[in-house]
Structures are given as C-alpha cells and as structure tokens.
Amino acid sequence: MNTTPRTWPPFVLIALVVTAALMSSATPSPLYVDYQETWGTSGTMITVVYAVYAVAVLVPLLFLGRLSDAIGRRPVVIAGLALLVVSMAMLAAAPSVAWLIPARVVQGLGVGLVTGSAAAALIELHPTRNARASALTSSSTTNFGIAAGVLLSGAVATSSSSPLVHPYVVMGVALAALLVGVILVVPETSGAGPATLREAVRVQRIAVPAETGSAFALAAVCVSVSWAVGGVFLGLGGAITKDLVGRSDYLVTGLVVACLQGAAAIAQLVWNLRAGPSMWRRGVVIGVATMLVGVVAASLTLEAGSVPGFVVASIVTGLGMGLLFLMGTTLVAQSAPDGARGEVFSALFVVAYISLGVPAVVAALAAEVIGLAVAFHLLVAAVSVISIGALVAVARSAARGPRA
C-alpha cells in the first residue's frame, strides 16, 4: 500500500475518471433513434444494444470484484480507461448495428473495471479519508457524468456533419487524456485484500461481510429503484422524445436525460450540505416520495403530449433518484470494511447494472407490442411497487435499530 501523504489532485483526477466513464456510457443515448432510422432496425434491437452494455459491466463486477483489492486500484482503473478508449474508436467506426454490440460490450467491460475500483479509490485518496464526502463524490459524478455525456453527444451531433462519429471522437480524446493523467499522477492506495490473484479472480457470490448485511440490503433496494428508472430514460429517451416532438431531436433527447441526471446530482449535493449521515432514513423516504411524484407526472405528461411538462417531470424524478442513490452509496461507504471495500462496492454495482438493463429491455419489448406510452405507464406502476418495498425496508430497519 502506498503511504505517500494524500493530496487533492489524485482524488480530483479519479473523480473526473468516474465522470468521464459515465459520460462515455451515455454518449450513444441521443443517437439511438438515428441508428434505428439509418439502419432500418427495430426499437427492440436498439434497446438490446443499450442493454448489452449493462450486461457487459457485470462481467468485471462478477469475476473481478476483488481484483483491485488484490493488485491495486491504479492498474484496474488504467485497464478500464484503455478499454473505454478502444470502445469509442469502435463506436465511431461502426457501419451497422451488428458492430455496435461488440463495441458496447468493450465499453461495458471498461466501465465495470473503473466503477468498483474508482469508488473504493475515492475513499482512500480523499485527503481526510472522509467516507461521506467520498460517497457523495462517487454518486454525484455518476449522475453528472451521464448528464454531461448526453448533452455533449447531442451538442456535437447537432453541429456535426457526421453525428454518428464525432461525439465518440471527442469523448475518446478526453478519455485518452485522463488515462495519461492517471498513469502520471495517481498513486496506489489499496490495502490488504485477497492473499492471491487466483483468489481475487473468481466469480463473486454477490455476498458481503456479515456485519454489512443489513445496510447493504437497504442500499441495494435504494440503488435498484434509482437505476431502473434511469435505465428506461436512457434506453427509451430518444423514442419518447420523438413521440413527443414528432421527430428525432438530439438536443431535446439530451435535455430530458440531462435534466433527470443533473437533478439527481444536485439533490445529492444539497442533501450533503444540509443533512448528516444519521438522516439516511429520512433521505430514503423523501427520495421515494419525490421520485414517485416525478414518474407519475412523467406518465401523465407523456399521455398529454407535453414536452415542457415531461422535462419538468424528469427533473422531479431525478431529484428522487439522486437521493436514493446517495443513500445507497453512503450506507455502503460507512459499513464496508477496508479489506473488502472493492468487493462490496462491486456487489452494489452488480445490483445497479441489472436494474439498469433489465427494465429497459422489458419496456422496449412491451412498447413494440402495446405502444410506448402504455409501456411507460406499466413501468411507473412497477417502480411504485418497488418503491413501496424500499419504504418497508426502512420501516423494518428502524424497528431493528441498525446503525447507518
């Protein structure tokens, strides 16, 4: 383990790495409708392209969740960034939908490697090793990254003569610069982990240390609700915008998703400034209530065909999403032991990415059969049920009196 005194530049750089990784994952979102129109493929197939990314992210989380605990955060982050640069080149060069799938797989592998290791590194690189501040940074950079990614992609595509190429070129250059920065600036931070590399590289059991169990269970419920809603907006945002506006529009699609994710990040920042870690139960309740108001409003405005209404509903939904994700990452950051922190964060993100991919594909399949609006209404009903489950979990946790 590196004993060099912790300073701000490495921490800030890793925060930028997380932001850029999530930016890259969202870069295709405003472009999906154009892919569908240009290549004549179905909406379900485009959503499958979106979903294979979420499945690919699970591979390093399932097989390599303890790798950064064994060999260090730095080499894992470097490998993840290198894969992301390659994926941007593959997406920029893709001539058909068949090429998008392997490109998204490579991208998912890269994000999966970065996500778990960087989340742990943020705690270890923070100059005061503040778990609360690091959890806030991890969750807010995720949301800001997705928001920035769709806005950047939409802006570049709108002003470009090659809208399906240039967004990836811009993102690839940024990722390459961060890769060089990590190599030159970031020290190693990992502590005692698995005794051998063979022990680290194995299928994870999606299990956490016993002392973390109750906190992790509630964190998983919060994160799954939050990411399921975000996944549907990312996967179907272009189709929803086209249905509302009457045509494909990169910037409106980017605006809807950016409002959702930007509001999530703002909610996290405001909560961190005004509430302490002991307020997590209230955070879960407020997050669930706000998100439910938002998704119901989104459903109503979609039915009414109101673009401004849908944007406002996306903002309200994002506020609730952000609080729920922050509560989940805070609980894990506070409860995970040092030697297993990478493994526990990886387990949390396994839950997150399953929640990100599966609902989006189900919604796309349903939209092909019963229509986009009806499929979205069914999603709202499903989210409502899961959210009630989150409130039940909070009530049971309060009755048992666990510490956050």
Image (cartoon, grey):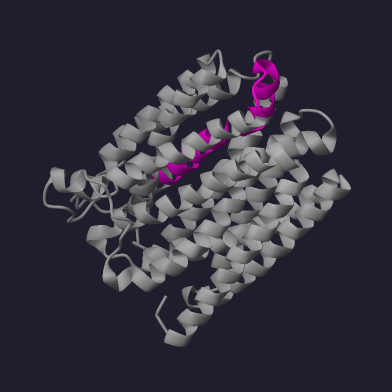
Seen at 20% across and 55% down, the residue is 191
Is 272 located above or below residue 154 in the figure? below
Q: Position of residue 169 (x, y in %)?
A: 53, 20
Viewer-side residue, 194 vs 399: 399
Residue for point 38% across, 45% down:
9
Residue 391 position within the rendered picture, expressed as x and y whole percent measured from the top left:
57, 74
Horizontally, residue 88 falls left or right of residue 75, namely right
- Residue 387 visible in the snapshot: yes
Q: Can residue 283 be seen here?
A: no
128 or 70: nearer the eye?
70
127 is higher (above) or lower (below) than 172:
below
Q: Residue at x 56, y 59 (%)?
A: 225
* Residue positioned 47% across, 19% down in the render: 90
Residue 155 lies left or right of residue 211; in this view the side is: right
Q: Which residues are magenta?
A: 14-42
- Give the left or right position of residue 213, taking residue 275 as reference: left
Total numbered labels: 0
| Vertical position of residue 380 compared to residue 252: above or below | below
Q: Main secondary structure of the magenta part?
A: helix
Q: Is residue 268 magenta?
A: no
* Residue 30 rendering spot, x and y as whole percentages: 66, 31
Q: Position of residue 166 (x, y in %)?
A: 59, 19
- Quadrant (top left, top right, bottom left, bottom right) of the C terminus: bottom left
